[in-house]
Image (tube, grey):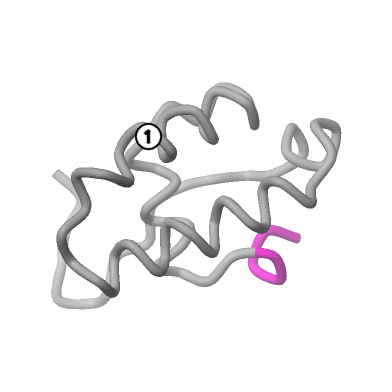
Amino acid sequence: MNQLLFTVEEENLICAFDASSRSALMIDINGALPELDDPELREIAERVLCKLDAMPDAGFSELILSPAYNDDETEV
C-alpha cells in the first residue's frame, strides 16, 4: 500500500525522522525544513508533508515503512 502513496525517495526521507505517528513525523519534518538547503530534498519533504496532511491517522498506522537500498548499497 505505501508503495502507491510514497515514492522511494519520500519513504527514505520518512525513515530518517520520528515516524512513530503521523503527527510526530509532520512535526519533525516541519522542524527540519528551515535547515534543508538542498532544493530537491526540500521538495521531497514538502511533498511528504502534503501527503501526510491528506492522510488519516488510521491510514498512516497501516503503513509499513522501511528504507530502500539500491543494489550497490548495503544496510548498515
Count of numbered tags: 1
The residue to which callout 1 is attached is 17
Helix, strand or loop: magenta stretch: helix
Tell me if residue 17 is in the magenta stretch: no
Residue nearest the observer in this picture, 32 or 64: 32
Residue at disc 1, secondary structure: loop
* Residue found at x 41% / y 39%: 29
Horizontal and vertical percent position of residue 11: 47, 57
Picture quarter with the N terminus: bottom right
Circle 1 packing at 10 Å, graded few (<14), some (14-19), many (20+), is some
* Residue found at x 64% / y 67%: 3
Which residues fall within the magenta stretch?
1-5
Along the horizontal axis of the image, is 18 left or right of 71? right
Figure check: 33 above or below 17: below
Residue nearest the observer in this picture, 14 or 52: 52
* Residue found at x 42% / y 57%: 45
* Residue found at x 33% / y 46%: 33
Along the horizontal axis of the image, is 74 left or right of 42? left
Horizontal and vertical percent position of residue 31: 36, 32
Toward which corner of the image does residue 35 lie, by quadrant?
top left
Along the horizontal axis of the image, is 16 left or right of 11? left
Residue nearest the observer in this picture, 14 or 43: 43
Figure check: 4 above or below 11: below
Horizontal and vertical percent position of residue 12: 38, 56
Q: Amino acid at mark 1?
A: Phe
Horizontal and vertical percent position of residue 16: 32, 41
Along the horizontal axis of the image, is 58 left or right of 19? right
Figure check: 64 above or below 13: above
Picture quarter with the C terminus: top left
